[in-house]
Amino acid sequence: MKRRKLLANLTITAAAAAVVPITGTGHSSAAEARPGELLVTGLRDAMLGLGPLGAPLSPDHLPGELARAVAHFNASSYGSLAVRLPRLIRAGHQAGAEYHAVLARFYLLATRALIKLDEPQLGWMAADRARRLALAGGAPLDVAEAARQQAVLARQAGWHDQSLTLALAAADDPALREAGNIGIAQRGLLIQCAAYTVAHQRDQEGMRRLTKEAAAIADELGGITHLRDTAGGFNRATVQLHLISAEYKAGDPSAAIAADALHPMTLPTVERRALYWTDRATAYAQWGRRDQCIDALLEAERCAAEETHARPAVKAMLNGLLVSGRTTPELRGLAARAGVLPA
């Protein structure tokens, strides 16, 4: 009995480490493509300078358009983001050097989306452009955020030492301290990032030490959410969210659930709340709590359906659940909506 349970748990977690293709012909038309696919395709073509330019967009409108694009991302509205963000990247390149700082933020947003959609090659391209443009535009906070995203990509590539160096070097930049509370919040995000990398190295003590440092920064800032428009927000609740995923990455999924002391509505954006539920689902899957894993995935879908259906990590988890044990109408329905099973 224990052996069968162990094998089932390993099947779920092993599938979660693989890329699971959507069942079908693999030749969907643009009209049939899902929002995540459209977003990746649009960003790829815009970054390569391909595709239609669309209607002209006044450079003066770019900051306002950036705010709208960030709102789409924070709401996990991938369909709307797929329409808006590639167009803004094209317009930003046409706007001239004085808009480099705004274009850097377009690329920062693109990087975050590409990381979620498991597109590391495009993610590296976007993050590198964001950092170069932020440096050219004299925007130290955006330079630091680009470094954080590069650290995430390095960690995903298994380059843990390089990831730590990127995050901690950026956190020590004096420009962040000079930027006031928002710079302090960015430093907190970078330390969170370093803690998560240490978790990947199975160093639970080191992860918890860095997480406490990030939590102390959040306490210093009080209850205000900072960086909502650039990194999904930073406050005590987002540090607690980070701890859930860090605990299961460090090798203790039961500790991840035990560490969960927050209500998802205290998180600053829909995107962060969806991440909360998918992180819980992953911890439950690794812990062998199949029913709770499925319930958490359904909550993620109720929170942010487009994101839940689009993320390869969720598809992989669903695939693992389908092949590892009893299926239910709820599981099969979610798998169909996510494209893992034929609808």
Image: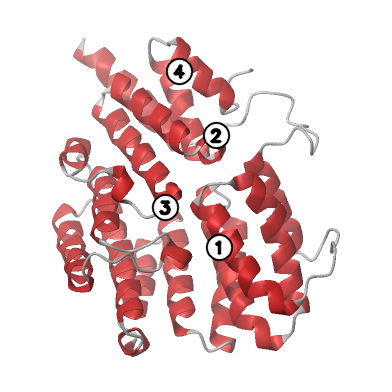
Q: Is residue 127 left or right of residue 267?
A: right
Q: Could you give the CA–CA distance between mark 3 and mark 2, rounded to whole angstroms?
A: 18 Å
**Residue at numbered disc 1:** 109
| Vertical arrangement, residue 144 with respect to residue 215, above or below | below
**Residue at numbered disc 4:** 331
**Residue at numbered disc 2:** 309
Who comes first in sequence, dot 3 or dot 2?
3
Report crowding for label 3: few under 14, some 14 to 19, many 20 or more residues within 10 A (C-alpha): many
**Please, what is the three-letter code of the amino acid marked with disc 2?**
His
Which one is in front in this view, the residue at disc 3 or the one at disc 1? 3
**Please, what is the three-letter code of the amino acid marked with disc 3?**
Thr
Task: Tell me the quadrant of the picture where the N terminus can be found.
Answer: top left
Residue 195 visible in the current orientation: yes
Name the quadrant containing residue 120: bottom right
**Residue at numbered disc 3:** 269
Q: Could you give the CA–CA distance between mark 2 and mark 4, rounded to whole angstroms?
A: 13 Å
